[in-house]
Image (cartoon, helix red, strand yellow):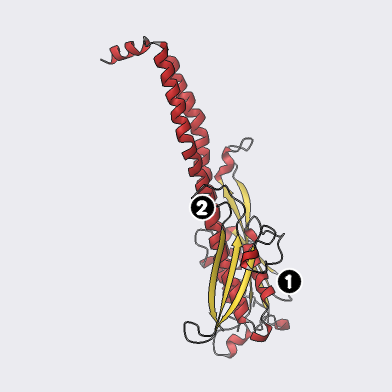
Amino acid sequence: MRVRTRGSSILEFTLVGIPSLFLLISIFEISRGMWAYHTLAKAVNVGARYASLHGQGCSTNGYRGGIAVQDVAGKIAAAAPGIPASTIAVTLTSAVSGPVTCNPLSTCLTDSTAWPPAASNENAPGQEIVITGQFMFRSALAMVIPGSRPVSFSATNLSASSRQVIQF
Amino acid sequence: MQKSRRGARAGAPIQEKCGRKGASVLEATLLCPWIFFIFVGAFDVGFYLNALISTENAVRAAGLYYVSSQKASRDATKSCYYALEILRAQPNVRSAVSTCAASPAAVNQATPVAVTMSSVSSGPDGQPATTITVTYQTVPLIPIPLLLTRQLTVTRSVEYKG
């Protein structure tokens, strides 16, 4: 009788412990995902804001104008603590030219190509720029999903975008 | 002492054992709603906070666009578009929503976002300013009576010079 009671305690703990652990990991991972998304959204917003304040009119007023891809990429990387530049893909889109893709962002940290391009007055005040960031969020939650491999972390694509008008 | 207690337990009458089992069921019944509500509360509050942060970002984006445009060409519809761009990550906005509600009171599940503007003759620095307000209604969540509503309507405003 006593042996049976002990066995049922272990069984009960197993039945309750696994879902509890799953819930706990879920809360951690979803919180981490939300934090990563909002950090990414903030970072692309900072990058777009920086570009919108450094248009062609900026240099004529004595300030630094004619920024390059590396300047915007640097701003985005600096504004995204905890998300390495090697894990973010960023697309810089100006009014006319094709998009500049930084996949990952770290490849653009030394790119001295002017952006937004001066051709077709794409860096003139009033023109729109769009910066889109994508982060592959890898979660340990996948480990406990039945059918997945033991250490197979699935990836969820988190995407954030910022659209702004060049001011100066 | 231990031995005698175990001995007593092994020889306990059937009615006593049944009573203990009943107590366990009662305890579980009393605890279950609390545990359920704690998880539901965490889930709802998470959605609410996400909506709050996103609405803050949306009102800034809409406001920046609106006040940076020439006064004569200020476009409230385009401001709505900028706000929606930021709110695209919300489950009831996504790519399905392309217009805003006419007023904050008119937000619903089909058009969960409203953007309104009002001119202020004297802002914080005494100069004319514009107040931009974004209202966003969350997806229906699990309500907790007297604590958490089924749907939260978030309103955030910014005031920009101009």
Crowd tier of the residue under label 2, counting other residues whose Cα lies within 10 Å: few below 14, some 14–19, many 20 or above: some
Task: Give the number of the disc on residue A164.
Answer: none
Circle 1: element type: loop
Query: Horizontally, is B24 left or right of A89 in the view?
Result: left
Quarter of the rendering containing residue A59: bottom right
Task: Give the residue number, with chain letter if any, for mark 2.
Answer: B45
Task: Give the residue number, with chain letter if any, for mark 1.
Answer: A98
The residue depicted at 63 percent of the width and 38 percent of the height is A148
Tell me the quadrant of the picture where the C terminus of chain A can be found.
Answer: bottom right
Labelled pair 2, 1 in contact (Cβ < 8 Å): no
Residue A151 pos. (x, y %): 57, 40
Single out the residue that lies furthest toward the top: B11
Quarter of the rendering containing residue A132: bottom right
Q: Is residue A99 above or below residue B112?
A: below
The residue depicted at 58 percent of the width and 54 percent of the height is B151
> Looking at the image, which is closer to me, A127 or A153?
A127
Quarter of the rendering containing residue A46: bottom right
Q: Is residue B24 above or below residue A89?
A: above
Q: Is residue B79 above or below residue A18?
A: below
Query: Horizontally, is B102 left or right of B154 in the view?
Result: right
Single out the residue that lies furthest toward the bottom: A61
| Residue A67 appears in the picture as rendered | no
The residue depicted at 53 percent of the width and 62 percent of the height is B53
